[in-house]
Image: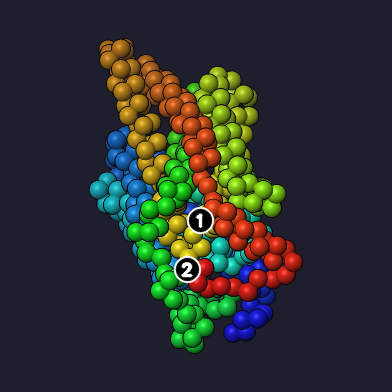
Amino acid sequence: MNTTTQTKSTTLQLFNLKNVSIRTFWITAISFFMCFFAWFGIVPFMPDVVRDLGLTPDQKWNSIILAVSGTVFARLLIGKLCDKYGPRMCYTWLLMLGAIPVILLGLVQTPTQFLICRLFIGFIGASFVITQVHTSLMFAPNIVGTANATSAGWGNLGGGANRLGMPIIAATVVAFGVAEAEAWRYSMIIAGVICFLMGIVYFFFTQDTPQGNIKDLKASGDYVEAKKDQVKFATVLKDYRIWILFLIYAASFGIELTVYGTMDDYLQNTFQLQRVTAGNIVLSFALMNIFARTLGGFFGDKFGKLKGLRGRVLFLSFILTVQGIMLVTFSLATSIIVGFIFLILFSLSVQMAEGATFSVVPFINKKAIGSVSGIVGAGGNVGAFLAAMLLKSKSAVAEKAAIAANQGLGEDIISSAQAAASSAAVSQGYFIIGGIVIVTGVIALAIKFSTEDEKVADVELKQSLDTLIPIDVKS
C-alpha cells in the first residue's frame, strides 16, 4: 500500500467513503452501536423476563451489576490486545465471540443461566475501547477528539435505540407467528446474529492503520518497532494521569450508565409518570448521544488549539464539574418540568465530559494507546458498578424500613410505601454521586503534560492543519 498517500485523516468528511479513515469510522461506529444495542437489548423486556424466569428483585439488581462488571475485565484486556494485534482482529473476534452469550440469552430457562449470560454479554462493552483505539490511529491530532467522541457517541446510541428497536423486532417476530411470550427470546437471538455478521464485515472492510494491517506491515518490513519504542504494560500502569482519567470516566460514563439504568423507575415513583412517558424521557436522554459526545470532543480539540494539551484538560475539568452540579440539582427537583430540564442538562454535560475525556486520552502515551484506552474505559464500568451498589444498598434499607413501618396495612399500601422510600433513597444517592463528580472535576486539574509533550503536540497540530500527516504505526 502506498505510504505517501494513505495518511491520517485531518477532516471528518462523513460521506468520503473512499477514504480508509472515514470508512473505518463508519464501520467501527456501527459495530459499537450493535454491541451496545445487544448489551442492553434485554432492558425493554425485563418485565417479561421477571415473569417468565421468576426473577426476584435482588436477582434483577444483580443482573444489572453483572452486566457492567464483566466489561471491566474485558476492557482492561482488550486495550493491551489492540496494541499487540491491532484493532481490526480484536474487533472481529469480539463481535463474533460476543454474539454467543447474546444468542444464548434467548435460550435461558433459569435465573442462574440468565445471570451468567448477562455477565458474559458485558464483555462486548469492550467494543468501546477498540473503537477509540481505531479512530485514534486513523485521525490526525486536530480532529482526533471530535472523531473519537462522534464514533463513541453514535455507538453509545445503541444503548438507547434498543428502547425502540427491540420492541419493533419483537412485534415483527410476533407477526410471523411467534408467541408474544417468546418474542423477547427471538429478539435477543436476532441481535446476536447481527453482531456476528458485523464481525465478518469488520474483518473484510477495515484495516488497522491508513497504511495497512499491522501484520502485513510487519511482514513487508514497513513496521519496525525498536525495543526503545516498546512500552510495557507495567510502565503504563505507573502513569498517575491514567488513573485520574480512570476516575474521570468512572464519574462520567459510569454515572451515565447507572442513571440510565435506574431512571425509568425513579421518574415513575417520584413524579408519578406512566411507564411509556418515563420511557420516552429516558430515550431522549440516550438520543442526545447523536451530538452531545461530539460536542465534548469538538470543544476538547478547540481548547487544544487555543491552549495546547493543558487546554484539553481545563475544558474536561469544567464540563465534569458542570455535570456534577446538574445531577445534584436534578436530585433535588420536585417538579417534573424542573426535573426534566436538569435531566437534559445532565445528559448533555455527562456525554460532553465523556467526549472530552477521549480528546485527552490519545495524548497520554502514543506508544500504548490501546492500553491507556482500555484502562480508562474500564473506569467507566467500575464507576457504574460502584454507583449501582450504592443505589441498591440505599434502596434496600429504605424499602425494609417502609415495610416495617406499614406492617399489616395491606399489600397496596406497603407497595406504595416501598416505591416512595426507594425513590427517596435513589434521590439521596444521586445527590451523593453528584457531589463526588464535582470533586472529580477538581481532581482533573492535576493532569499535567511536560513541556516536551506540549511542544510535540503543537508541532503535530500545525502539521495536521497545514497538510496530511503520514501515519506512524509505532504510535
Q: Can residue 380 be seen in this view?
A: no
Relative to 217, say whether 296 is above or below: above
Give percent across and percent down for residue 214: 48, 77
Please name the amino acid that badge 2 sits on: Pro
- Residue lying at 59% horizontally and 33% vertically, measured from the top left: 322
Q: Residue furthest bottom?
A: 220
> Who is closer to the viewer here, 60 or 127?
127
Identify the residue shown where x is 69% and y is 66%. Answer: 463
Is 77 left, or right, of 328 in this rendering?
Answer: left
What amino acid type is highlighted by mark number 1? Ile
| Residue 402 visible in the snapshot | yes
Label number found at residue 66: none
Location of residue 197 in the rendering, given as x and y in whole percent from the top left corner? 47, 69
Which residue is at a point 34% across and 21% down the rendered structure image? 398
Q: Which of marks 2 and 1 is nearer the N terminus?
A: 2
Quadrant position of residue 91: bottom left
Residue that carries the numbered disc 1 in the rendered image: 364
Q: Is residue 58 above or below residue 220?
A: above
Regarding mark 1 in the picture, which secondary structure is present there? loop
Q: Where is residue 42 in the image (x, y as percent from the top left)?
A: 42, 48
Give the number of the mark in front: 2 or 1.
1
- Of the pair 163 and 132, the residue shown nearer to us: 132
Distance from the alpha carbon under mark 2 to that under mark 1: 19 Å
Q: How many labels does the image show?
A: 2
Quadrant into which the N terminus falls = bottom right
Mark 2 secondary-structure assignment: helix
Q: Which mark is residue 87?
A: 2
**Quarter holding residue 472:** bottom right
Instruction: Give the residue at x 34% y 52%.
Output: 70
Disc 1 crowd, CA 10 A, few/some/many (<14, 14-19, 20+): many
> Does 177 appear above or below 97?
above
